[in-house]
Image (tube, rainbow, N blue to C red):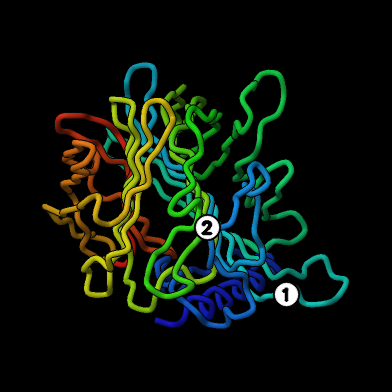
Amino acid sequence: MKPFKALIVQWAMILIVGMASGCSPPPPTQSLDIAQALSSDEDSACYDRAKKSETINLPSDHGPHNGFKTEWWYYTGNLKSGSGRHFGYQLTFFRQALACRTAPGPSKWRTNQFYFAHFAVTDTQNQQFYSAHRMNRQSVGIAGASRSPFRVWIDAWSAKDIKGPDHARPGSIQLTARDQEMAIDLTLVPEKAVIFQGDQGLSRKGPGPFDASHYYSIPVLITQGKLEIGNESFEVLGKTWFDHEWSTSALGDDAGGWDWFAIHLDDGRDLMVCQVRKKDNSPNEYGFGSISFADGTYEILGQSDFSIQAVQLWKSPKTGRQYPARWKILVPDHTIDLEVSPVMDGQEHSHMFVYYEGAVRVTGPVTGLGYVEMTGY
């Protein structure tokens, strides 16, 4: 596979030519790997590096960090309608720097930043998974991110701060996105304190000096609003997990991907665990995680504090890739013993970026709902 950056530039040029000609750009000829994006060290010496623990200042650090090559804002959640019908949703925004500096010149089209986004809805009742993606460069307002007030967007897909008397809690977010078969308009209100992952927000992913990212999470955002599937519209309520992460080359050369879980347990605890895999799919011993307790305090977890065991596999009929499909997750020091399974098979993004991201349910001594992301399979 070509280096990630070269493919992004190639696809960006196709996109720009298509826009200039008034045509929709053709689909890419090969898929890209998100794990590879974080592994690529090509032309990265001139970018900022996540190499030491630094204070993350909120709310300003909700915004973009253009000196780093890669950044993402991740919203995943489980929602229910008034009748109890379950939906999972994902809205994620990615920023990728194409060069260290913007090319000189007066044109408003000049930029060194490229944005793409993924939007998905899982309709559990009908066993349907809807997935869409968009991409555009940061220029003339069509895509971008800002710090004050916080906003990240591509066209009409956006996440932004909500201000005003109707939203007393700081940090409330409005998510909006619409595609051909689905739409969301959701308000997210933080219920728990921010988790600064790793060492005060420096999350190590491997043995190299720069195998790290700056990373924080909001484990619970109470989520309500409207979700549409086809001609149906639902008022929904549920919980969202939010991740914000920025780096230049977070994964080492031997990293092949990761298995990430964020789970809202019904006893008030919220768990995130992530196992980074080598290219042979064995753990690289830099797994990480956190557990947020009912009172909002939290504890950081390392590789030795938890285990993730795949106990069943699923093969995608679209891409032929094989993923784990049921897991046993143990956190012995916190008496957590979970059986985790997808709410439905087939929650695979099979467009330009191929990976698995979907809603999961938890059974065992404690129950719950969450999300899993798997890359590099």
Which one is nearer the viewer's eye here, 302 or 139? 302
Label 1 neighbourhood size at 10 Å, few (<14), some (14-19), many (20+)?
A: some
Discs 1/2, front: 2
Residue 292 picture quarter? top left
Q: Is residue 117 visible?
A: no
Q: Quadrant of the N terminus?
A: bottom left
From the top left corner, tell me how far across and down residue 133 is, in percent. Answer: 50, 55
Determine whether 312 is above or below 354 in the image. above
Amino acid type at mark 2: His
Q: Earlier in the sequence, mark 1 or mark 2?
A: 1
Q: What residue appears at the point 23 percent right and 47 percent down from the top-left corner? A: 345
| Relative image position of residue 46 (x, y in whole percent) | 64, 78
In this rendering, the answer to whether 128 lies above or below 208 is above
Horizontal and vertical percent position of residue 235: 46, 22
Depicted 227 relative to depicted 374: above or below: above
Q: Is residue 307 left or right of residue 65?
A: left
Q: Please report the residue visible at 43 percent of the width from the left and 23 percent of the height from the top.
A: 237
Q: Amino acid at mark 1?
A: Arg
- Tell which residue pokes out farthest to the left in this image: 311
**Is residue 190 in view from this perspective?**
yes
Secondary structure under tag 2 reads strand
Tell me the tag on residue 254: none
- Mark 2, residue position: 214
- Residue at image coords 12%, 53%: 312
Q: Which residue is at 52% across, 69% downward?
A: 26
Few, some or many residues within 10 Å of mark 2 (<14, 14–19, 20+): many
Question: Viewed as shown, does residue 99 lie left or right of 338?
Answer: right
Circle 1 sits on which residue?
101
* Alpha carbon separation for disc pair 1 and 2: 21 Å
Please state which of residues 164 and 245 is positioned toward the viewer in this rendering: 245
Residue toward you, 51 or 369 = 51
